[in-house]
Amino acid sequence: NAGVTQTPKFQVLKTGQSMTLQCAQDMNHNSMYWYRQDPGMGLRLIYYSASEGTTDKGEVPNGYNVSRLNKREFSLRLESAAPSQTSVYFCASRGSGTYEQYFGPGTRLTVT
Amino acid sequence: QKEVEQNSGPLSVPEGAIASLNCTYSDRGSQSFFWYRQYSGKSPELIMFIYSNGDKEDGRFTAQLNKASQYVSLLIRDSQPSDSATYLCASLYSGAGSYQLTFGKGTKLSVIP
């Protein structure tokens, strides 16, 4: 079991470029989450998907879109990157009836 | 606005001592609370969760919850250098089919050999 995987691990974008961060889990979890983590700011929820086919906004959704492609995969898209989106992005998943969220290794994104 | 407050530290303790990490929360509707450990450059991992008033022990770790005071703490006994990390406190909001964690900014712990 790989758990939660994220690609890419590192990315540098120029302002205005677009990109998609990929996340996949092999634990048959229903719920998946995208967070960003900035120095001194803790983890903030961007979007989540309670089950396949559903997505909802979290605390900081502006500038992002998501797609729950299937039960395994949950992608995060930046349509027009801005320097304020420089951050570390974590994907997480959670099984039904459990509390624990399992986190992926993160993607370090820099927007110049 | 659901908020979770933590002292950012750094908190320095000598090896073998008890480290005490504290957290307060604003939403009285929060029912469950989580402590995650995050090593530098790594992803968070769950240490413990607690949902009843009182203490919950797991090995060297004890979580304490006081809902009247809206206060959560994590005690680490016999602290080791390998415990040096940032500790994130989180509260759970569940309702209307959603399940969301609100995280504090984390407390950085340094255990001095």
Image (spheres, rainbow, N blue to C red):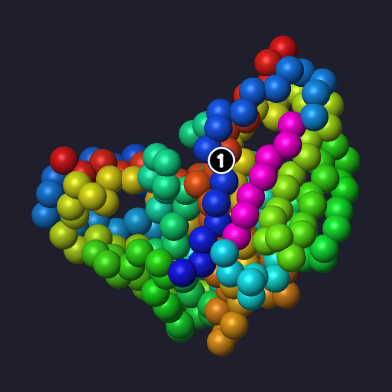
Q: Position of residue A60 (x, y in %)?
A: 35, 64
Residue B20 colored in magenta in the image: yes
Q: Please, is residue A26 above or below residue B94 in the view? A: above
In the current view of this chain or complex, which residue is farthest to the top? B113
Q: Please, is residue A39 above or below residue B66 in the view? A: above
- Residue drawn at (70%, 66%), measured in percent from left and top? B32
**Which residue is tagged 1?**
B7
Q: Please, is residue A112 above or below residue B91 in the view? A: above
Residue A92 colored in magenta in the image: no
Q: Secondary structure at mark 1?
A: loop
Residue B34 appears in which quarter of the rendering?
bottom right
Q: Position of residue A29 (x, y in %)?
A: 62, 69
Residue B92 appears in which quarter of the rendering?
bottom right
- Residue drawn at (69%, 56%), measured in percent from left and top? B71
In the current view of this chain or complex, which residue is farthest to the bottom? B96
Tell me: A97 left or right of A81: right
Going by the numbered disc 1, the residue's amino acid type is: Asn
Range shown magenta:
B19-25
- Residue A13 in sight: no
- Residue drawn at (40%, 40%), measured in percent from left and top? A39
Name the one closer to the observer, B14 or B85: B14
Quadrant location of the C terminus of chain B in the rendered image: top right
Q: Position of residue B36 (x, y in %)?
A: 64, 47
